[in-house]
Image (cartoon, grey):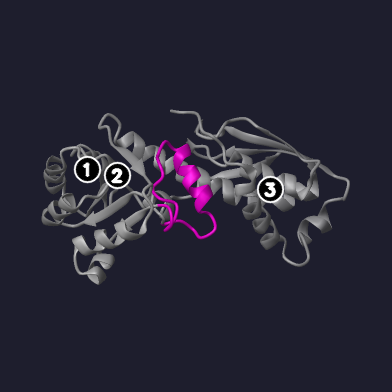
Amino acid sequence: MTPIKELPRILFENTVRQGLLEDLGRGGDLTTDAIVDSGARFFGRIVARQTGRLAGGAVAALAFELMDASAVVERSLGDGDRIDRNATLLTVEGPARAILGAERTALNLLGRLCGIASLTARYVEAVTGTGAGIVCTRKTIPGLRALEKYAVRCGGGSNHRFGLDDAVLIKDNHLAVAGSIENAVARVRETIGHTVKVELEVDTLLQLEQALKVGVDIVLLDNMAPDSLRKAVDMVGGRVITEASGGITLETAAEIAATGVNFLSVGALTHSAPCLDLGLDVE
């Protein structure tokens, strides 16, 4: 797997900061402040309770560092690495009050991102040898898109468009308003820049034929059975990129990938990934 290029801190610092502010509320950590002496020190490890794939190590570290700049965090694994059960992901040492105050924010974000990376890795493994890639969608939690799409990359997947402004995707509702594929594509071509790619969602082979005539860059083959997908790939003949979408599961991914499509678009990577079970253990 290609080494992961980590996100610049500026892209997630506000997310972490807002998470801490939400948890601390208006009065701070009432429990910890009452029980733990102000000068107490803490050393602990974030440990995985199950196997998976790591994503978001720097995000978790920042939660502790924002609570107290003197906190020392050492990461044992890099993003994209496989996680074994009981593995130490990072260690943290510093003022006990600060570390305990940041614990839940760090674990929430890290568990979420590791869960996405872990599920993505399972999909990638399911289609190994087919030549098809696994991509995510815009079905992300508002405010977390950059991090969640980063986690997909940590799991070996790739990213579809990040927002409405970086690529064109003409869907069924657009076609209903435009009246036809020809009208929709023509209107798009009149307004977008020359560097913007155009993708069109098709539900039938007849729509695919029309799409190939008007000229698009990518066809999204929506909710097609494997037999139809194979026919669609044959019709395309390599002229445009093909992407299968719609209810793809771990059980069906291999069969769909074997049809010859270039990509499988899987919303479940972000909207249904369970958090990886992690814990902060005190030493």
Say whether disc 3 or disc 2 marks the residue closer to the N-terminus: 3
List the residue tagged with mark 2.
Answer: 264
Q: Position of residue 244 (x, y in %)?
A: 25, 47
Are there few (<14), some (14-19), or many (20+) residues within 10 Å of tag 1? many
User: What amino acid is found at the position of numbered circle 2 in the picture?
Assistant: Leu
Q: Position of residue 83 (x, y in %)?
A: 51, 33
Q: Is residue 157 magenta?
A: yes
User: What amino acid is found at the position of numbered circle 3 in the picture?
Assistant: Ala
List the residue tagged with mark 1.
Answer: 256
Q: Position of residue 63 (x, y in %)?
A: 68, 48
Asked if the residue at tag 2 contacts the one at tag 3, i.e. Cβ–Cβ closer than 8 Å, the answer is: no
Q: Nearer the viewer, mark 1 or mark 2?
A: 2
Name which residue lies at 65% across and 52% down.
16
Q: Quadrant of residue 262?
A: top left
Are there few (<14), some (14-19), or many (20+) residues within 10 Å of tag 2? many
Q: Is residue 83 visible?
A: no
List the residue tagged with mark 3.
Answer: 63
Magenta stretch, residue numbers:
139-166
Label 1, label 2: how far apart the Cα atoms are:
8 Å
Q: Position of residue 127 (x, y in %)?
A: 29, 35
Asked if the residue at tag 1 contacts the one at tag 3, i.e. Cβ–Cβ closer than 8 Å, the answer is: no
Asked if the residue at tag 2 contacts the one at tag 1, i.e. Cβ–Cβ closer than 8 Å, the answer is: yes
* Relative horizontal placement of residue 275, taking residue 186 as reference (left or right): right
Name which residue lies at 45% across and 28% down.
2
User: What amino acid is found at the position of numbered circle 1 in the picture?
Assistant: Ile
| Residue 70 against residue 139 in the figure, above or below | above
Label 3, label 2: how far apart the Cα atoms are:
34 Å
Say whether disc 1 or disc 2 marks the residue closer to the N-terminus: 1
